[in-house]
Image (cartoon, rainbow, N blue to C red):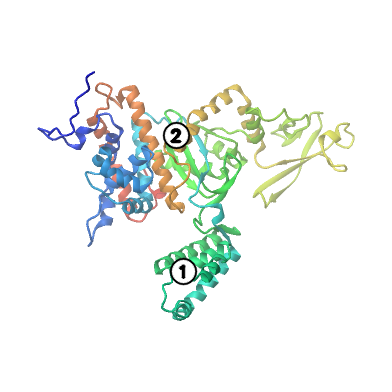
């Protein structure tokens, strides 16, 4: 049979450019166009001054975004790709930054990365992919780059600090001690007795860190001293009894398998129209309930005040009287089930008992309850629950003494039935009724197609099951890049499917590159204003879009 002729050694009459080797509809062209049409002048100002020429921040940003899209998160692998992969050669303009340069850029440019994701979300809005009609909010737990065995307690930290202080005070005595032990022999060729002694060193974490300090070179000692300062600061800030020495800003959190491990808590808000991320963050707090308000505020900082009756859906981890009141005050249509209802919707619990609180009818005008037997439960007093940090209103039954069902209703042998309320009961009841309706459950099911799909893509396709970087700033940059990659992937996929881009059409099913460039240039003025404000010391959250 005949084979296709191989042309490895065939000379080119007209040598192609790198761009000629890449398909017209490859996603790297979208990455290139979007980043190239952003104004980086204010960022470029950071590189003014003497020293060796630096790689342009646009080149670094494109490499990080494309790497994340391809699931290549390691800075070493990205650096290697710039020498072997035509896509990365194209995006890097034939430059080959080393892995340290790539890693350092990702670590030191969180604000820039945050601005890029905001601009891409606005671009998606201009292209009709973000409607702001239904926003889904959710969080997940992603493992930190630290072992559970890396934690140290305050007592162990004091022990380490004391040992290091003593080590620093010894000074010249160390050299004298080594002379007594080693003499003129090579310290790497110790007698067996010394090797055995070394094996008997205490195995606890404090001892290991102290040994690392004592046996380390000057660079290693400086690193441990710096890390010690971070750990001490984090212990004071967190109020915890122990933190990780490897990544002090990580926290113990339970994953889906109910196993506690050092992790961070990424939060996202996704527009239900096409699954575009419109807000994201990474927090140390294990509880999601406190993140609903910041997520909505972040969306409004990018797009302005949300339209009246915008749907906000979130799972029961975000259910609280405060959050429901917040949505009501801002005229947003919330869909958040309480814990019992969420379990019921998943078929995990039985029907509630006859005398459960949910079966007591609340009377808004009178501010009292009516029990299943028709007796009134009136307001008695209120107090502040320090443990939960909430104001509590307590209601007492008025006809419990003669009630034949008292034993079924309350465990109290003497007093009447009590009901505790942790907020505006009318708003809570309204939310519960809405979530129990078929219409409410249909709206709530949209979450599974949007925000939950996002986390599946980020963890499975991008490979972000564990952070590579350490520290809150580093993991925030890493997660933001994952969201940028997700958004660009969605834009590219949608436009490939619809064969249109904004008001312009595509050619032969491929995105019209000139149309995309014009779209990107239209946001240049806003981008310039943002970066100009940033260079004056303003936070991204102080900027007006």
Residue 88 place in picture, x, y as percent: 27, 41
247 versus 224 height, above or below: above
Residue 22 versus residue 179 in the image, above or below:
above
Q: Which mark is residue 198?
A: none
Quarter residue 397 falls in: top right
Residue farthest to the left, as pictured: 13
- Image coords of residue 245 (percent x, y): 52, 59
| Camera-nearest residue between 462 and 430 | 462
Residue tagged by mark 1? Answer: 215
Image-based side of 259 in relation to 110, left or right: right
Q: Is residue 279 left or right of residue 196?
A: left
Residue 467 x %, y %:
46, 47
Judge the density around disc 1: few (<14), some (14-19), many (≥20) Cα neighbours within 10 Å.
Answer: few
- Verify CB contact (< 8 Å) between mark 2 and mark 1: no
Q: Where residue 234 sits in the image (x, y, percent)?
A: 52, 60
Task: Examine the rendering and report whether any part of residue 139 can be seen.
Answer: yes
């Amino acid at each position: 049979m005949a084979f296709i002729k191989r042309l490895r050694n065939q000379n080119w009459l007209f040598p192609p450019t790198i761009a000629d080797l890449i398909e017209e509809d490859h996603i790297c062209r979208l990455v290139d166009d979007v980043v190239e049409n952003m104004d980086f002048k204010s960022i470029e100002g950071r590189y003014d001054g003497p020293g060796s020429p630096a790689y342009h921040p646009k080149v670094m940003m494109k490499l990080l975004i494309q790497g994340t899209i391809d699931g290549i998160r390691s800075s070493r692998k990205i650096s290697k790709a710039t020498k072997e992969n035509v896509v990365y050669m194209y995006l890097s303009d034939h430059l080959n930054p080393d892995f340290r340069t790539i890693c350092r850029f990702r670590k030191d440019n969180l604000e820039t990365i945050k601005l890029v994701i905001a601009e891409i979300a606005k671009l998606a809005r201009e292209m009709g992919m973000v409607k702001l009609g239904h926003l889904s909010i959710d969080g997940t737990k992603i493992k930190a780059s630290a072992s559970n065995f890396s934690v140290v307690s305050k007592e162990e930290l004091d022990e380490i600090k004391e040992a290091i202080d003593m080590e620093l005070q010894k000074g010249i005595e160390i050299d004298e001690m080594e002379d007594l032990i080693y003499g003129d022999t090579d310290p790497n060729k110790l007698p067996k007795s010394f090797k055995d002694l070394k094996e008997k060193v205490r195995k606890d974490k404090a001892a290991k860190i102290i040994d690392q300090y004592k046996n380390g070179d000057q660079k290693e000692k400086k690193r441990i001293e710096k890390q010690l300062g971070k750990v001490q600061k984090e212990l004071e800030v967190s109020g915890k009894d122990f933190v990780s020495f490897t990544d002090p800003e990580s926290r113990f959190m339970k994953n889906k398998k109910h196993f506690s491990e050092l992790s961070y808590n990424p939060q996202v808000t996704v527009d239900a129209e096409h699954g575009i991320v419109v807000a994201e963050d990474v927090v140390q707090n294990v509880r999601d309930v406190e993140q609903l308000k910041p997520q909505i505020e972040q969306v409004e900082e990018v797009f302005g005040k949300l339209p009246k009756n915008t749907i906000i859906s979130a799972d029961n981890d975000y259910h609280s009287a405060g959050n429901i009141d917040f949505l009501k005050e801002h005229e947003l249509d919330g869909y958040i089930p309480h814990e019992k209802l969420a379990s019921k919707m998943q078929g995990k619990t039985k029907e509630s008992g006859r005398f459960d609180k949910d079966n007591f009818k609340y009377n808004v005008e009178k501010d009292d309850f009516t029990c299943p037997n028709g007796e009134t439960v009136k307001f008695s007093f209120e107090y502040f629950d320090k443990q939960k940090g909430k104001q509590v209103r307590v209601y007492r039954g008025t006809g419990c003494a003669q009630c034949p069902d008292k034993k079924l209703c309350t465990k109290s042998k003497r007093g009447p039935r009590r009901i505790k309320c942790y907020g505006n009961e009318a708003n809570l009841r309204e939310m519960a009724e809405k979530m129990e309706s078929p219409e409410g459950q249909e709206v709530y099911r949209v979450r599974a197609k949007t925000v939950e799909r996002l986390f599946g893509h980020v963890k499975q396709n991008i490979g972000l099951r564990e952070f590579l970087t350490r520290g809150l700033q580093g993991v925030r940059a890493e997660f933001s890049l994952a969201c940028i990659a997700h958004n660009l992937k969605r834009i590219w996929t949608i436009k490939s499917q619809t064969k249109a881009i904004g008001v312009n059409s595509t050619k032969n099913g491929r995105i019209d590159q000139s149309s995309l460039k014009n779209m990107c240039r239209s946001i240049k003025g806003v981008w310039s204003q943002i970066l100009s404000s940033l260079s004056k010391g303003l936070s991204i959250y102080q900027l007006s879009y």
